Amino acid sequence: MTDFARTKALFAIPDGVVYLDGNSLGPPLRGVAARLSRVVEEEWGGDLIRAWNTRGWMAMPAASGDRIARLIGAPAGSVTMGDTLSIKVFQALAAALAMRPDRRVILSDTGNFPTDLYMAQGLIGLKDAGYRLVTVAPENVEAALDDTVAAMMLTEVDYRTGRLHDMARLTRAAHRAGAVAIWDLAHSAGALPVGIAEHDAEFAVGCTYKYLNGGPGAPAFIYVRPDLAAAARPALSGWIGHAAPFAFEPGYRPAPGVERMRVGTPPILALAALDAALDAFDGVDMADVRRRSIELSGAFVAAVARAAPGLELASPRDPAARGSQVSFRHPQAYAVMQALIERGVIGDVRAPDVLRFGFAPLYLDLDDAERGAAILGEILASGAWREPRFSVRAAVT
């Protein structure tokens, strides 16, 4: 069994803070600062440019990719790192469309994260060949799959409500319709077992600054099903994805396997921070993480029902139907959240009225869930959120 008391001790969370926003930005591990200092002072500072060879910098995307592969149920050598999630969405979608050249529909749902839809819209604009992005209600995705759909592009866990798609069922349905399946694991990786290889999806992408705790702007990952990796077209044909980047050939030749999905120079400092963060998952069983997150989120839902009985639950009530996140609706969600943050309980808001709370078992326990709910109830009962200062909007919500 996973020792969550041990993992909690690894994190540097300020005293008195209940941190329920790891679904947006995970907290740092205590060893990250020392790791970054060592990379800056000893590796970069000591070896300078030689560190690309002496410190194995160029291999870091593959090494971190293998560590993430274990957490999403993928084989070693099928995941690589780099760039942002938006870039990886673009790459996966472009490769998927190339695999179905006779089809013109990209199917997604209305609960998908906007950047995924924006990237699809941008790619369609570049292609100018009759492609369409079709979005349907999450519960209608399966019915919308037909022989016009080239790619089904979904985020497994809804960023607003925490609703969890049935990856196995929808991937099977996509394949029956002849479509390629692309899964965004931004709110899944590190939070629940994914089983991406088991479910036979062609592509998956995800960020590493949420439940994987890689730090703000940490690099994204992309998974390509191994039997497709040698043929997938990377679209963004950057020099680091070349078969021989230091041959400096004028023409592009894709690297073997998933490495062709690398684009630009690896962000070494960010990868070092991520590698240190992934140490928290050593010895951790993702099935234990899932059981614990259900316990924590369930305790929070029950405690909120007692402390604030009028607050509307926006997430599925069945814990098996949601990820590691619980959301509630309040017409003045922004002000309520600012009052809550001032009291040391940190969650966040999604427009127009959603209060979001993430439950990461690696650093949260039942006391955190109970305390967070109790303070939320006090703020709502007292009307403390009505103070005008809590309604002043910050740039980032």
Image (cartoon, rainbow, N blue to C red):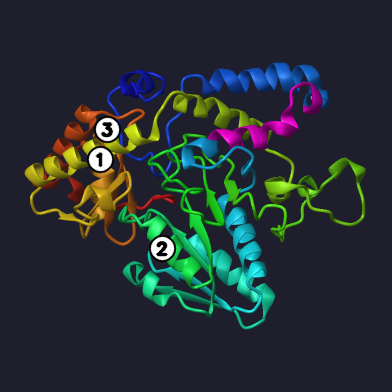
- Label 3 sits on a secondary structure element that is loop
Cα distance between the residues tagged 1 and 2: 23 Å
Q: Can you give x and y, in whole percent of width and height, for residue 105 in the image?
A: 54, 77
351 relative to 256, above or below = below
Which residue in the rendered view is the most extreme toward the bottom?
130
Of pointers 3 and 2, the one earlier in the residue sequence: 2
| Amino acid type assigned to the residue bearing label 2 in the image | Leu
Please provide the residue range marked out in magenta.
52-67
- Label 1 sits on a secondary structure element that is helix
Q: Can you give x and y, in whole percent of width and height, for residue 107 in the image?
A: 48, 71
- CB contact under 8 Å: marks 3 and 1: no
The circle drawn on residue 294 is 1
Q: In the shown orientation, is residue 217 left or right of residue 59?
A: left
Q: Quadrant of residue 341?
A: top left
| Amino acid type assigned to the residue bearing label 3 in the image | Gly
The label nearer to you, 3 versus 2, is 2
Q: Can you give x and y, in whole percent of width and height, for residue 288 in the image?
A: 33, 32
370 relative to 313, above or below = above
Q: In the shown orientation, is residue 126 left or right of residue 220?
A: right
Q: Is residue 65 magenta?
A: yes
Q: Is residue 247 magenta?
A: no
Cα distance between the residues tagged 3 and 2: 40 Å
The circle drawn on residue 344 is 3
The circle drawn on residue 170 is 2
| Amino acid type assigned to the residue bearing label 1 in the image | Ile
- Give 321 or 388, whichever is nearer the viewer: 321
Residue drawn at 30 percent across, 56 percent down: 161
Cα distance between the residues tagged 3 and 1: 23 Å
- Alpha-carbon neighbours of circle 1 within 10 Å: few (<14), some, or many (≥20)? many
